[in-house]
């Protein structure tokens, strides 16, 4: 068995750019859909929190770049190819279906193929696909080596290190201006920089015209693609696959030499290494063989950008100590691990990364010990790691255990028809959609005209160079200049076209969600005002308002909220502690926008109904639990707040 609880199976429809889709939980089909596009597949997978998306051929999703983009949008789900791998060979899906008793070996239609893919992945058949980005390394180094003597030695060193510094800044600015993702490691000298290494997460051809190799009397610039495979296939039916599902706390000490340390959620070291010139991609590949990164940790505050980017790309938490760790403290932590686990940090980079991971584990240790105490007799041992991970992400211990013990979800009800009150908003969105389509059409026309003009000029230039026609003044140089100018305009128009397509897709998704009854529209107000409280939006019989921030809440505003019958508030930023305490006293749930599935369309927020129901229910449970455990705590907090502000309780 694979250990997956929920699996989505997909198969591409013939002659259509869409898929058949099923979701299976514990061998039971709970949802089925036809003609669903890739964007909707990602949204459904994230909404239903599936563990894997199974297919018979990953290249039905698109080319390597499209597959990387698809996987990057998934929140925790793995991509599984059930028919095999290049190294192990392939089996037809019909044969797999026959072995599972789901077919007689006949050719399957897309709907049945999606079902067989889901069931095969649940049964532990197939390979989890790990996706890696292409990488290119840019190395800047000095050409001269300085000896011990000479009156001009210091001047030469300052000149060389200054040249390396200037060149590093120029390359960095070029990469930033083109929107390329990269990391840079610097080797500092007394007067500037001795050397620098850029790890650019893009293929080598994408750097043409941005950075070029260089060799001067004092500086070398080398550009080389880093050898790495695009995909790796790991069997989901063996022990390695189950190990790859464990959650890890990863400490990283980036630099010219990078240290990596990984602890499991029991505090055991599962990996400790260091290496020169290690990129984020190499760190990701190393972690993929060990498990799933839950927390990335740094030993310094503020954290290096490499650690922050790793946390973001893995959808993991970022741990930063309140103050940068001292060398003595890091040495003490390394010694303790050597005594307890007989694993020694071989250098300062391993020591620093291990200290970062250990400090992060220590901050969660109390909660993890409570999880073990509460859950050891009620859940299976293999579920304990997932419960710990949920608690670290912020879920209460009770909710995490209940989620692990929860029965499979029931089939989802059919979408409700849209309500009459939404007709006006849908018309507004449709008007914006029509405007976006008109703009898209105009941009396509401009792009076609520029392409035609560019091709005509290229033909004239070719003929002029061959001598077939005499070039018209001002000559072929003017043609080349004009071609370069038009090429720039074409690139700009294409960028605008992509932007218009993106806006178009957003409006389409919002209209579809409102029309199907899955989503609801809310007016967004800058702050809590009488206007906002006077015109709340209705949702499931509740009166809800959405505000950009909830920074202040005096007694008058609190009384106005109760008088207006406001049932919940959606806010884009977490309110201060006194305001949160006052809202809890008023028993009005506060829901953070980041906890919801939403899309901004003008001044409206289009929010997925299921995520909003769950968030409101969770906030209400927190209020009830708070009053059950300490009914006077909120009043005490509020009295303290008024005392700090006015000098005495009001």
Image: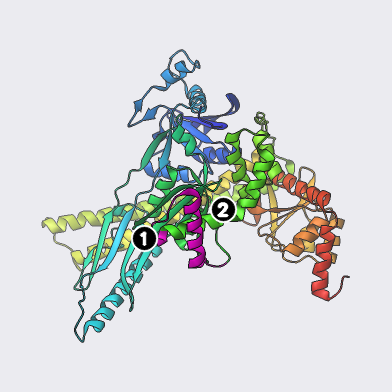
The reply to whether residue 71 is in sight is yes
Q: For this rendering, which residue is in front, 504 or 143?
A: 143
Where does label 2 land, which residue?
361
Apparent side of residue 253 relative to residue 543 in the rendered image (left or right): left
Where does label 1 land, which residue?
257
The reply to whether residue 490 is in sight is no
Residue 92: % across, % down: 39, 22
Circle 1 SS class: strand
C-alpha distance separating marks 1 and 2: 24 Å
- Image-quadrant location for residue 145: bottom left
Residue 634: % across, % down: 82, 59
Apparent side of residue 287 relative to residue 543 in the rendered image (left or right): left
- Residue at 57%, 38% in the rendered image: 44
Magenta region? 323-349
Residue 401's place in the image compared with 284, above or below, is above
Query: Does the magenta portion include 493?
Result: no
How packed mark 2 is, by other alpha carbons closer than 10 Å (few <14, some 14-19, many 20 or more), is: many
Q: Quadrant of the C terminus?
A: bottom right
- Residue at 86%, 74% in the rendered image: 648
Apparent side of residue 628 relative to residue 155 in the rendered image (left or right): right
Residue 35's place in the image compared with 368, above or below, is above
Q: For this rendering, which residue is in front, 228 or 539?
A: 228
How packed mark 1 is, by other alpha carbons closer than 10 Å (few <14, some 14-19, many 20 or more), is: some
Most prominent secondary structure in the magenta stretch?
A: helix
Q: Residue furthest front?
A: 339
Query: Does the magenta portion include 331?
Result: yes
- Residue at 30%, 77% in the rendered image: 162
Circle 2 SS class: helix
């Amino acid at each position: 068995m694979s250990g997956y609880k929920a699996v989505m199976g997909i198969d591409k429809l013939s002659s259509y750019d869409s898929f058949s889709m099923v979701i299976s939980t514990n061998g039971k089909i709970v949802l089925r859909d036809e003609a669903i596009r890739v964007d909707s597949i990602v949204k459904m997978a994230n909404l239903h929190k599936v563990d894997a998306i199974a297919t018979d051929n990953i290249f039905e999703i698109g080319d390597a770049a499209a597959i990387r983009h698809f996987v990057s949008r998934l929140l925790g789900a793995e991509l599984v190819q059930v028919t095999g791998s290049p190294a192990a060979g392939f089996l037809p899906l019909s044969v797999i279906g026959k072995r599972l008793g789901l077919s007689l070996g006949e050719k399957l239609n897309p709907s049945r193929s999606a079902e067989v893919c889901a069931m095969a992945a649940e049964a532990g058949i197939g390979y989890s696909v790990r996706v890696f980005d292409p990488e290119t390394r840019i190395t800047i180094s000095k050409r001269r080596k300085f000896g011990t003597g000479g009156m001009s030695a210091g001047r030469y060193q300052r000149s060389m290190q200054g040249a390396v510094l200037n060149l590093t800044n120029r390359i960095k600015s070029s990469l930033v201006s083109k929107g390329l993702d990269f990391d840079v490691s610097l080797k500092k000298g007394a007067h500037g920089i001795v050397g620098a290494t850029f790890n650019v997460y893009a293929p080598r051809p994408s750097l043409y015209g941005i950075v070029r190799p260089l060799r001067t009397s004092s500086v070398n610039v080398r550009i080389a693609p880093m050898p790495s495979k695009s995909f790796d296939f790991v069997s989901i039916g063996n022990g390695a696959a189950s190990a790859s599902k464990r959650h890890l706390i990863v400490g990283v000490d980036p630099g010219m030499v990078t240290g990596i340390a990984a602890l499991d959620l029991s505090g055991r070291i599962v990996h400790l290494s260091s290496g020169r010139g290690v990129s984020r991609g190499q760190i990701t590949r190393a972690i993929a063989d060990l498990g799933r990164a839950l927390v990335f940790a740094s030993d310094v505050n503020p954290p290096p950008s490499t650690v922050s980017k790793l946390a973001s790309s893995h959808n993991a938490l970022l741990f930063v100590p309140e103050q940068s760790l001292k060398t003595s403290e890091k040495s003490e932590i390394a010694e303790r691990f050597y005594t307890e686990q007989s694993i020694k940090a071989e250098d300062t980079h391993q020591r620093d990364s291990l200290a970062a991971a250990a400090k992060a584990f220590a901050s969660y240790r109390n909660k993890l010990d409570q999880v073990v105490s509460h859950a050891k007799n009620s859940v299976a041992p293999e579920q304990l790691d997932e419960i710990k991970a949920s608690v670290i992400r912020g879920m209460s211990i009770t909710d995490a255990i209940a989620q692990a013990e929860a029965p499979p979800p029931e089939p989802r009800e059919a979408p409700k028809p849209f309500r009459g009150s939404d007709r006006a908003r849908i018309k507004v969105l449709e008007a914006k959609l029509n405007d976006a389509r008109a703009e898209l059409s105009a941009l396509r026309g401009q792009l076609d005209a520029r392409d035609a003009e560019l091709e005509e000029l290229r033909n004239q230039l070719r003929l002029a160079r061959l001598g077939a026609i005499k070039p018209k003044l001002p000559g072929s140089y003017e043609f080349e200049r004009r071609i370069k100018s038009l090429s720039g305009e074409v690139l700009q128009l294409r960028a605008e076209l992509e932007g218009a397509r993106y806006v178009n897709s957003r409006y389409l998704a919002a209209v579809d969600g409102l029309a199907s009854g899955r989503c609801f529209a809310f007016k967004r107000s800058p702050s809590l005002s009488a206007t906002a409280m006077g015109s709340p939006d209705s949702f499931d019989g509740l009166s809800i308002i959405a505000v950009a921030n909830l920074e202040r809440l005096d007694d008058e505003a609190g009384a106005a909220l109760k008088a207006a019958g406001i049932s919940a508030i959606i806010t884009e930023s977490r309110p201060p502690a006194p305001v949160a305490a006052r809202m809890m006293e008023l028993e009005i749930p506060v829901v953070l926008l980041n906890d919801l599935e939403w899309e901004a369309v003008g001044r409206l927020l289009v929010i997925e109904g299921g995520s909003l129901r769950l968030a409101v229910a969770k906030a209400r449970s927190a209020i009830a639990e708070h009053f059950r455990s300490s009914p006077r705590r909120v009043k005490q907090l509020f009295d303290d707040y008024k005392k700090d502000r006015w000098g005495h309780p009001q």
